[in-house]
Image (cartoon, grey):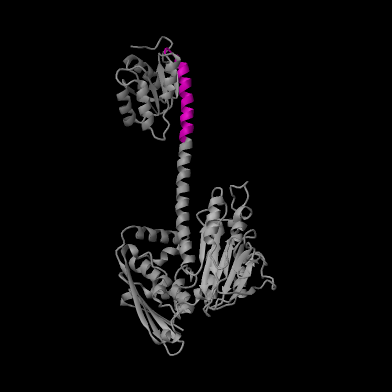
Amino acid sequence: MRTFNNQAQPDTALPAAPRGKALVVDDEPTNCRLLTQMLLREGFHAVEAHNGEEAIAKFEAEHPDIIFMDVMMPGMDGFEATRNIKSRSGGEFVPVIFLTALRDEKSLIQCTEAGGDDFLSKPFSFGILKARIRAMERVRDLQRAIAAKNETLSTLIEKDQEEQKLAERLLSRAVNTRNAATGRYRYVQRPAATFSGDLVLSQYLPDGGLRILIADFTGHGLAAAIGAMPVSDIFHTMTLKGVDDDRVLSEINRKLYQLLPADRFMAAWLISISHTGTTLRWWNGGMPTGWMQSRHGLNQLESHSLPLGIMHPLPEQEHTNYLQVEPTDRLLLMSDGLLETNTKIDGKMFEDAGFHQVLDRWNYGEPVMESLIQALDELRSGDPLDDITIVEIPLGSSGYTGSKIPKNAVYQSGWHWSIELADARLDALPSLEDLLGPMGLLAGLHNHVGALQTIITELYTNALEHGVLQLESNMKSTPDGFELYYRERERRLAVPTLGWIRLSLNYLPGSGPDGSIRISVRDSGQGFDEQQLAQTDASQPWGRGMKLVRDLCESVRYSRGGTEVEAIYAW
């Protein structure tokens, strides 16, 4: 039995303001009572425990704000009880002050190692104890304030990351799903953040050629990607209409000049390959030098213009360039994130440490992407500081003209094709090229693949979101509407989704080069209100996809209570 000495007498001051709950652990009832009285006068609500096991139980039940722990007790001692309590407190800081008669150095070290935050040797002065308590309270309050701020910060970071991932997915879907001929060239993108400020767009030209835009916005992340949507809209729309390169560049430049602040712009490559694969038109505004491997060696395609969005209008002399190419020539283009990647070789950038060695080993007629990526991964030091985009394009005509089916056979025979996606597969409609290309059904139709892909994507999305998922377009009418709409879309797709969508295509050949394709999309939902779509005006932030479908198609007709739509695309 151990007792406090005469110095350890409580004062007679009036009770102070509430200061929380204290747990007093001591096997001697007298000691417990004396300390409890002192704590009550100091404004604490005190609870008592008389051994280690009881201390743990009181800690779990009472959630004290401070603990006064004796060391030597029957059964579980104060060291073990403190270790146990500290392990149960998680991230919350609950100070433990040892009150012990032990004075040897080893015991005091044990107090600290067990998790004690302070100790006081018996007999002790109540005045000193009160000073130690105030010190521990300051430390505890500081720890709690920091923990609360960290929790708030973690919540904000988690929410921000979640929203950025959602926005990145939506942006990627809106931009990338309209790309055509993605299997005809290869590209690699490595974003430095959730968003990539680099952009790769591709679309067929009406004459069967292929146009590709590779762009790099200033900076990286969301701020860099903000211009991607309008650039994508302009690129695809004008390319499908066959607008020439200079007018496409001029329109994109005008839009970015209006949209972006003065310190933001977009460096870009614009490549147009003729349907024969023998003519290359190229424009380089502020992008790194491109490299074309031909039988005569490597040709450099250097930047010859300002990036887009800096000056409006573009200087008249900054037109596209022309090159005659051969079927085995290959083109390598990249953003500056690749060349400026730090490497392990004396901190040099990849351009100085390995890029040109890869070019030196690049054999005519062979791909170079694999060698380039391997060298980058072997030499790079840490994560990229800027977005990386690499595009390799084989310039031969075979990649752009489809299967070798006789032209007359294409125009004289029709075909019917359909697919039904259900439940978990509803959110993953493959591209038109992946669906029809392997069967040769796109032979002779490559001039129309881009438009068909746009029409099918819009009709299918409409059936999924409004038919199967029963989402209302007017959710997008509020300032946060788009985020709420797509967050609800993700939520409904994340749970088991019961339903189906059937897509049918019927190719109807005409006499000569004319023809049409009947597109039918039917869903298992409750029907789509076509009248609601008819009432949509240009000021509303929805319905533009269906308006585009009507512009591209000869006719669009809903039936079966709005669960089926048939569109005729003719040429």
- Answer above or below: position of 76 versus 424: above
Residue under the point 59% across and 64% down: 259
Looking at the image, the residue that sits furthest to the bottom is 511
| Near-viewer residue (436 or 235) | 436
The number of callouts visible is 0
Quadrant holding the N terminus:
top left
Magenta stretch contains residue 447: no
Q: Quadrant of residue 474?
A: bottom left
SS assignment for the magenta stretch, majority = helix
Residue under the point 60% across and 67% down: 293
- Answer above or below: position of 224 versus 408: above
Residue under the point 59% across and 50% down: 342
| Near-viewer residue (428 or 357) | 357
Residue 419 screen position, x and y as percent: 33, 72
| Near-viewer residue (529 or 395) | 395
Residue 102 screen position, x and y as percent: 41, 14
Residue 472 screen position, x and y as percent: 38, 66
Evaluate whether residue 15 shows in this view.
no
Q: Quadrant of residue 506?
A: bottom left
Residue 431 screen position, x and y as percent: 42, 69
Residue under the point 56% across and 50% down: 380
Looking at the image, the residue that sits furthest to the top is 6
Magenta-highlighted residues: 122-144
Evaluate whether residue 174 shows in this view.
yes
